[in-house]
Amino acid sequence: MVDKPENDNQITKLSSYFDFKKGFVLCVLITLFTVSVEGCTEQAGQIITTAANSSTTTDSSDEQYRYVTDMRGVQVKLPKDIQRIATIDDGFVEGVLTNLSEVEKVVSVGSVGLGSSSLYQSNITLNSGTNYTFSGGSNTMCVVNPWLANVSCTESSSGMTIINYEKLASANPDVLIIRVGDCSMSANDIENNNKKISTIKSLGIPVIVLYSPNNYNNSGLNTMRDEMRVIGQLFDKEEKTMALADYLDNTEKMILDRTKDIPEEEKVTALYLGISSKARQSGGAGYVSGIDTPESYILETVANGRNAYQDTGSGKLLNAEQVLALNLM
């Protein structure tokens, strides 16, 4: 297990889609690093909770309920037969729910990247003044489950980190699953996150909290196993989610084995660059991920490549000249 979280910057950016039946775990891995077209950036911060692998399930004396311990170490009382699920994440939770055949119970999402059809087309004005229209893009989970684009979205129009509590309450979920470290729930904004969770609890909605790898220093992907375990416990399907986690582990090991002998002089140099209109509005070309991020872990450790951006942190805004100076050719 990785060290407890500290105040380092992290980011999530990458998406893909491939055959669901045979390769779903790869889809889950990619979904972890999915962001909206607007270029969400994420930073990690300290989390004052118990270890992530402490999740357990205990049946309540009331046969209609069970208790699930989330990644805060908090026991949450939940209906045994969950029928209505709300999420605040960027697609990872929906990915695991799809594997468990429970995704059809999602009645509310917390990211416009999942809940809006506007992702299918984006109009971009380049610095030269040229207008460019991008179409066909979508969050991975909206490709697998197109109906998610029409589900109620609780992300406020005032900003992606602001929750519309009225819409969340009107969805009447049996449980809300929050993934801290995704766009809508910043990993470094602990005080604000706690306020959001307290407000949601005051509405009578049970809250399950997960922590993405962005909450940990120099993290790999192993904390995703703990996330999957907790989600599985909600539906008494822990064994199935652990099989999913094993497949992810084996896929990672397979890639490690295939790339481990690449000599230093033959390593491919690549740059994680999140291109977005928000970056351009801030005077930059895009956001990059440093060597202490999960993205860089996949690039340098798993794929045995080289991260072109050799500084630390994530969500670092670079302009076009700085990107060109990295000499990627």
Image (spheres, grey):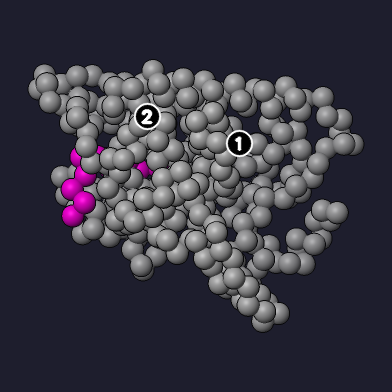
Q: Is residue 308 magenta?
A: no
Q: On screen, 310 above or below 299?
A: below
Foreground of the two, 317 or 34: 34
Q: On screen, 117 above or below 299?
A: below
The residue sitting at 41% across, 50% down in the picture is 146
Find residue 62 and report its horizontal and vertical position in percent: 9, 22
Foreground of the two, 145 or 41: 145
- Residue picked out by circle 2: 100
Q: On screen, 76 above or below 117?
A: above
User: Is 200 left or right of 290, judged from the image as shown?
Assistant: left
The residue sitting at 42% across, 31% down in the picture is 99
Q: Which residues are magenta?
A: 170-181
Tell me the kind of residue under disc 2: Leu
Q: Residue furthest bottom?
A: 129
The residue sitting at 44% across, 49% down in the picture is 142
User: Is 314 left or right of 241, judged from the image as shown?
Assistant: right
Tell me the kind of residue under disc 1: Asn
Find residue 38 and report its horizontal and vertical position in percent: 52, 63
Find residue 120 and report its horizontal and vertical position in percent: 50, 61
The residue sitting at 31% across, 53% down in the picture is 151
C-alpha span from label 1 to label 2: 30 Å
User: Is 54 left or right of 165, judged from the image as shown?
Assistant: right
Foreground of the two, 58 or 187: 58
Question: Callout 1: helix, strand or loop?
Answer: loop
- Residue picked out by circle 1: 218
Foreground of the two, 322 or 171: 171
Q: Which quarter of the figure has residue 299?
A: top right
How busy is the neighbourhood of tag 2: few (under 14 within 10 Å), some, or many (20 plus)? some
Kindly tell me whether residue 325 is visible in this rendering. Answer: yes
Q: Residue furthest left?
A: 62
- Total marks placed: 2
Question: Callout 2: helix, strand or loop?
Answer: loop
